[in-house]
Amino acid sequence: VRTIGVLTSGGDAPAMNAATRAVVRVGLERGLNVKGIRKGYNGLLNEDIIDLTSRHTADSISRGGTILFTARCDEFKTPEGQKRGAEVCREQGIDGLVVIGGDGSFQGAQRLAELGINTIGIPGTIDLDIACTEYTIGFDTAVNTAMEAIDKIRDTSTSHERCSIVEVMGRGAGYIALWCGMATGAEDILIPESFDGNMPKLEQQIIEHLLRNRALGKTHHMIINAEGVGHSYGMAKRIEAATGIETRATILGHMQRGGSPTAKDRVYASMMGAYAVDLLCAGKSNRIVGYQNGKFMDIDMDEGLAMEKHVDDYQLQIAHLLGK
Ligand code: ATP
């Protein structure tokens, strides 16, 4: 490998910059040229590609967002788009590519690997929804950001003796909700993994829980709802109508994706960036960098993407027990 490229793709996540910085600095240290591809696979197809030096990543480790920008690119989902992507890599002399993104981005990387470009995926998503790794870049920061916001909502909610529903991100996965719920001592945690789609039944359980707690003298009731369950505003209206207890819904939204990354995210992302470069130097391709059982590791991309992720039953059980 002489020249490697790096891109960020899909939704942005705090500490993607730390990973990019490590790819650049370790790459240069290993004697490689490093090219930055801006705006994900769009930038690859449009040849929006720059030579990166250590200076390009200066002051980036503490910054949220991604200095390489990110985008979604439908053209890259087509075989023609993928062929063109591989051609651009060849024209630019890029013989190894690091893709920082979610599972969609990894599928793009798989296609490039099939077309002869060595690719390594780094899991960059706040959702923690990649099965082959216990850690994804940005999850820790997103959970901490949401936790601080929920603590603030709880203060005012307690003063007014309200019921609060706070909806957090996570797409189809409930990890952010589960962690935020445990970390803020929420009374109810709603996640798609344990939701059977029966909204009236779920709301009835919450209503009974809320009324039981009021009878015991509890002054507030915090419900953390995952994006994958959704319908927070309607839920608040129906709970208020059924109980007579003022109920407000807040959807935290994109604030969870921004902000300065936590130390954990910065360090893990740096390690993963370095690991990806060393895999390319060892001639590896079609691998995902992960973290399992206390160690950074790598796994075949096809195998990793075929795995299914499950919420830890014991954690879920304890979270519910603590909110009783
Ligand atoms: P997030 O978890 O933040 O959504 P993601 O990487 O899963 O991140 P996607 O929007 O699914 O986000 O994918 C990002 C980009 O990866 C797409 O816009 C597209 O360019 C490419 N991509 C996604 N799926 C495929 C696929 N099946 N084949 C080729 N490229 C793909």
Image (cartoon, rainbow, N blue to C red):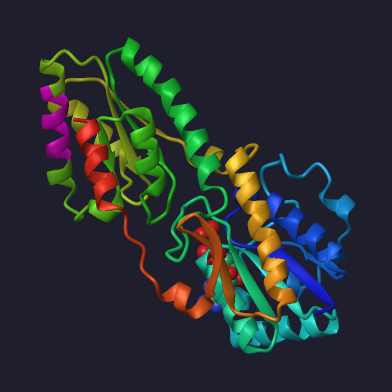
Q: Judge whether 59 appears above or below 249 on screen.
A: below
Quadrant for ligand 1? bottom right
Q: What stretch is highlighted in magenta?
A: 203-212
Q: Judge whether 224 appears above or below 69 on screen.
A: above
Whole-percent x and y of residue 171?
A: 42, 54
Image quarter in which the N terminus is found: bottom right
Question: How many marks are shown on the rendered structure?
Answer: 0
State the residue at coordinates (49%, 54%). 294
Q: Is residue 322 left or right of residue 126?
A: left
For the question of whether residue 257 can be seen, the reply is yes
State the residue at coordinates (84%, 46%). 58
Q: Is residue 311 left or right of residue 134?
A: left
Q: Is residue 97 magenta?
A: no
Q: Does the magenta stretch include residue 205?
A: yes
Q: Nearer the viewer, residue 256 or 299?
A: 299
Q: Judge whether 260 appears above or below 94 on screen.
A: above
Q: In the picture, residue 105 is in which quadrant?
A: bottom right
Q: In the picture, residue 158 is in which quadrant?
A: top left
For the question of whether residue 68 can be seen, the reply is no
Whole-percent x and y of residue 253?
A: 49, 41
Q: In this view, does 85 lie to the left or right of 246?
A: right
Q: Is residue 278 left or right of residue 208?
A: right
Whole-percent x and y of residue 120?
A: 64, 72
State the residue at coordinates (77%, 45%). 60
